[in-house]
Image (cartoon, grey):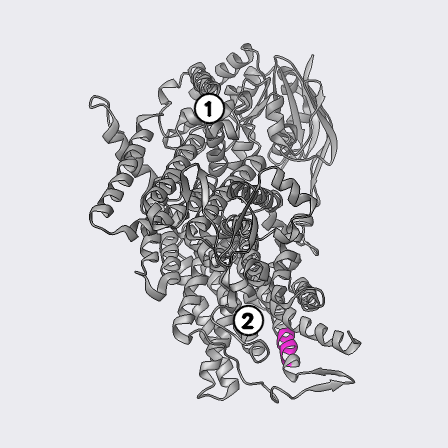
Amino acid sequence: MSRSRALPLAVFTALIVLVQLATGLADKGQYLTQLTMAAYYALPILGLTLLMGYAGQISIGHAGFFAIGGYVSGFLTTFNLTELSSRWWVRAAARLHLLAAGQDAFASQTLVVRAWPACIAALLITIVVAYLIGKPVLRLKGHFLAMATLGFGTIVYRLVLGTSALGAADGISDVPAFHLLPGLDVSGKSALRISNYYVAWGLVLVTVILLGNLIHSRIGRAMRAIHGAEEAATASGIDTQDTKLKMFVLSAVLAALGGVFLTHYNGGIGPSEASIMKSVRMVAIVAIGGMANLWGALIMGVALNFLSMRGSFGSYDDAVFGVILLLIMLLSPQGLLRADLARRLVRMVSRRPKEPVT
Amino acid sequence: MNLLTVKGLGKSFGGLRAVDDVGFAVATGTIKAVIGPNGAGKSTLFNLVFGAIVPDQGSVEFAGTRLAAGRPHRSVSAGMARTFQHIRLFPQMTALENVMVGRHTRSRSGFLSSLVPLPWTRREERAIRAEALSAMQFLGIQALAESDATHLAYGEQRSVELARALASQPKLLLLDEPAAGLNMRETVDLGKLIRRIRDSGVTVLLVEHDMGLVMGISDEIVVLCQGQKIAEDKPLAIQKNPEVVRAYLGDDDA
Amino acid sequence: MTFALLLQYLVAGVTYGAIYAIVAIGFGIVYNATGIINFAQGEFVMLGGMLAVSLQAFLPLPVAVLFAVLITMGVGALVEILFIRWLDRPTVLRMIVITIGLSIGMRELALLVWGEGVRSLPYFTGDAVSALSVGDVHVSPQVLWVLGTVGVIVAFLVLFFGKTRLGRQMRACAANRDAARLCGIDAKGMVTLSFVLAAGIGALAGCVVSPITYVQYDSGTNLAIKGFTVAVLGGLGNSAAALGGGIILGVIESLSIIVLPAAYKDVVAIALLLAILVFRPAGVFGNAATARLKEHA
């Protein structure tokens, strides 16, 4: 990995640790909770940055994928299969160690899917849905993807809002902890606040590294080529439809992953997570962060989501993001944290003194 | 041996017959030029050969197999490469990165292996870089490697685009008006360069307006007029062909 | 399901469908002039209705509607001048995001001014229970107002673009902006005019349908999606096809209650949109404008 990539990662890791220690010292533990949530919201934002900034495609329905992730895993880990325990597929699932038995608050028997299989199921469903939407729509002009994703997000919202099995307006609650590894749980218990903080930000860090690898690889170059000059990309032998589709699916999977983890962390999920305004928020953050700028989107995402969660925007929450989006797109479509400026800054800092500064 | 065989190609746009029953062949290791007055259908023919548009009639046979039209990226995998009349370089990428994209069909690392780079993908990435650099060296522009591609001078950008096309190690190179915007001396250099490309084993098909260049380097010339082929012959014969002269200068005495 | 009930559903479907058609026509006017889909078109409809409701508190109804339409047309011009005009060859992505931002901005402003409540104009003739009856089928006179207004709008547009000098100039600009400019046509003015026109017809539609459907600060988004569905059905830039497509969508949506829970009614339009995109992207009617929209950006 080049110096210019490793340096920001090191700085960021240090920052994560510092913030945690600082909140511990200042006894502001609840900040950690909000920062953990912000981390999980950062995952769809990173995916969207890849899609919008690097691949040049727009999606105004990414909250829909986030919600699919959260609702599928939330539903599977809370839906009691005890009544159906004689069915063959329930018994088969039990034999494959996919289920967990337990007792609920009223001491009656529960049988639910375990968190890991539920997570994988959520991601697989997301892949299928993203593929089905993306394949026909990506070969059309940008407006179509925008409308199709807007429509998709609206469908998801209406479906989860109107289906009683998914909790309708109340959503799903009492979602159990996600036993990631023996001894490492994702849940909202305040005793596990610190470890959860590191799990969340560890996940974000790994995502940034992987996406960075992708961007600097052959496929990443192909993606940037498509964004820059699609006809020339085709003329260089790139299968543009296939590449665009893969980017779309990847960004959807990242969003779903965020949904899965946040649902376990919060112990539940509601229809508002699928709302169009949540999708627009993500687009606004990617835009202000610099479009093709993973770090920019990350920083802006954490800052804005953190403030939003603390209620700093009051009842104008949605309006703030809408206005941000508008202003950025009008005045500075490259975003505030311009990728090329940031690159130059990093290069200046990490270069050996003798080499000229670009 | 014919590398490229075009048979009975036809294409209409609305009511306009852009290309009408055009057929010719390009022998391996030669330079063939397509010329004709404006509106003769040269660009349409070019795009049909490359596979960027689907013909209404006819076929394109390349390296022994029939080309599936409408999927130009497959033409590239099969061994074709092209340049554009109006330069299309990738913005926000260096010249070297632009040329590295040219290696796309000669490399394999896919989606998953790009996310988590394995030793073989790292090796392939180094190989891509080296091959791209050598394509730039062939054209003498390796010094431009780290420059932002779209900030280069016009002539340099043309060279980068050519390097990108050559990087894919094509069997057939399609050049779309390569001399556009070049002065006389640059055009002479271009002619020498195209001959060097041909000598290195690449067959060349070019569309061009500059008669000096065309007559100087082509082994054979195809002349189009209003979508139809009116002549296909060696340069000297073409110059003497009365039909060709009439097509360019017009028929009337006015 | 009696025949009379079926007819009632059909009438409802045609009524709503006519409004969706107006939204699609609005999309088409702006798209033909600028090449962009103005996501805020639904908000023009909403604004017309909301403004008229506020104005008719102290103005007679026809005057209130007139002023509501005029003010919305002014807003359309303002939007174009402030946000669209000075952009220098923007990318499709940027334009999409800008118009989405505008849509949200207008929606939040409406929320600020009018709050969350639903509003409606009084019925133009009669009231909520008056009905014209043909046998067992009872139709509110407002339905006739809606269909009549939409018919007049479409007729006006056909005449405007077909026969008037201004309309022909707009078509020239849409076909080839540079050539039009060389002929002395004020291309920038044409763009503003397209926004004004789209805003005006949207506002009028919003006024005439509000007694039946009510308007709310967020009515716009739904309308935009449904209007886009109609546009994809082939109605982009073609008023007749838009009407046809709108009616088809409205009827399908209305009859969907027979098989789906009412909560999912809005989903029908979107599902239809996605289905069309998957199976017949050329659109059911398919015309040149929609085809152009299909090409790669």
Write the residue at 52% across / 14% down. Answer: B197
* Pick the front one: C3 or C48: C3
Q: Is residue A28 visible?
A: yes
Nearest the camera: A26 or C205? A26
- Residue farthest to the front? A107
* Residue position marked by numbered label 1 in the rendering: B100
Of residue B88 and residue C116, the one placed in the foreground of this image is C116
Which secondary structure class fits the magenta region best?
A: helix
Task: From the image, state whether disc 2 or disc 1 is nearer to you.
Answer: 1
| Three-letter amino acid code of the residue under disc 1 | Met
Q: Which type of secondary structure does the marked residue at label 1 adopt?
A: helix
- In the displayed structure, A280 sits above or below B205; it is below
Q: Chain of mark 2?
A: C
Given contact means CB atoms under 8 Å apart, are the residues at marks 2 and 1 in contact? no
Give amino acid for label 2: Ile
Q: State which region is magenta.
A: C145-152
The residue identified by callout 2 is C201
